[in-house]
């Protein structure tokens, strides 16, 4: 003998029963029909409590309609999952591209830092070289004059004319007896000779 499937109802309103014969429930509660009383009431259960339930406050949840509804919900959830999976894959691709770009940028930064360091070292040497060979007054022309007796080679030919009149070395402020023209590459040898 086939067992009769109980009818299931969903409350569409809140209902406060009298506590004796009526069953209290809230909107959205699921009620099971135990027996049919009349066209207005049925005897139902909720959370192990039983009582009369008015038909006008509930709607029947038919199994085939519920199955269709749940199948539709499952289909929608699957579509959302597929969309989320696609988004995750896109994000992973973006992360991979960004990681490669970051690694490439870090390598480029490292190379630029090394190049900058080399340029600073080269520039510093070049600056020292330029400062050692430029006139200390105009900072443009090459040093070509030696001051006697102090031996400072710090002036170009143009600036030496002015210091012949001033008669003091711009480096040590010693009195100038004479200014000699000399090739700066032979300055050390020359100065050693005039000292001896």
Image: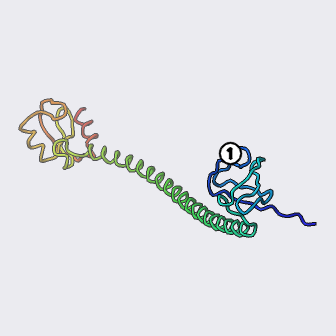
Residues 136 and 120: in front is 120
- Image position of 141 with respect to 173: above or below: below
- Image position of 122 with respect to 85: above or below: above
**Residue 191 is drawn in which quadrant?**
top left
Where in the figure is residue 61, as x and y percent of width and height? 71, 64
Colour pattern: rainbow
Where in the figure is residue 58, as x and y percent of width and height? 67, 59
- State which quarter of the image contains the N terminus: bottom right
Residue in the picture at 9% in, 34% down: 167
- Image position of 172 with respect to 136: above or below: above
- The residue that label 1 is drawn on is 18
Q: Is residue 10 left or right of residue 133?
A: right
SS under mark 1: loop
Residue reaching furthest to the right: 1
Residue reaching furthest to the left: 165
**Residue 54 is drawn in which quadrant?**
bottom right
Residues 152 and 10: in front is 10
Residues 35 and 32: in front is 35
Where in the figure is residue 152, as x and y percent of width and height? 21, 36
**Residue 85 is drawn in which quadrant?**
bottom right
Few, some or many C-alpha atoms within 10 Å of disc 1 (few <14, some 14-19, many ≥20)?
few
Where in the figure is residue 95, as x and y percent of width and height? 56, 59
């Amino acid at each position: 003998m086939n067992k009769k499937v109980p009818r299931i109802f969903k409350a569409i309103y809140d209902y406060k029963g009298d506590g004796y014969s009526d069953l209290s429930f809230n909107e959205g509660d699921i009620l099971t029909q135990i027996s049919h009383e009349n066209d207005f009431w049925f005897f139902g259960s909720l959370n192990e409590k039983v009582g009369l339930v008015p038909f006008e406050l509930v709607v029947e949840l038919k199994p085939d309609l519920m199955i269709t509804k749940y199948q539709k919900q499952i289909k929608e959830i699957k579509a959302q999952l597929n969309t989320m999976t696609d988004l995750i894959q896109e994000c992973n691709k973006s992360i991979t591209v960004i990681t490669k770009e970051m690694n490439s940028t870090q390598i480029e930064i490292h190379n630029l830092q090394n190049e900058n360091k080399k340029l600073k070292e080269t520039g510093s040497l070049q600056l020292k070289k330029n400062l050692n060979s430029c006139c200390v007054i105009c900072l443009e022309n090459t040093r070509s004059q030696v001051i006697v007796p102090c031996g400072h080679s710090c002036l170009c030919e143009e600036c030496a004319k002015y210091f012949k009149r001033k008669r003091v070395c711009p480096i040590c402020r010693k009195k100038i007896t004479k200014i000699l023209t000399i090739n700066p590459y032979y300055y050390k040898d020359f100065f050693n000779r005039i000292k001896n």
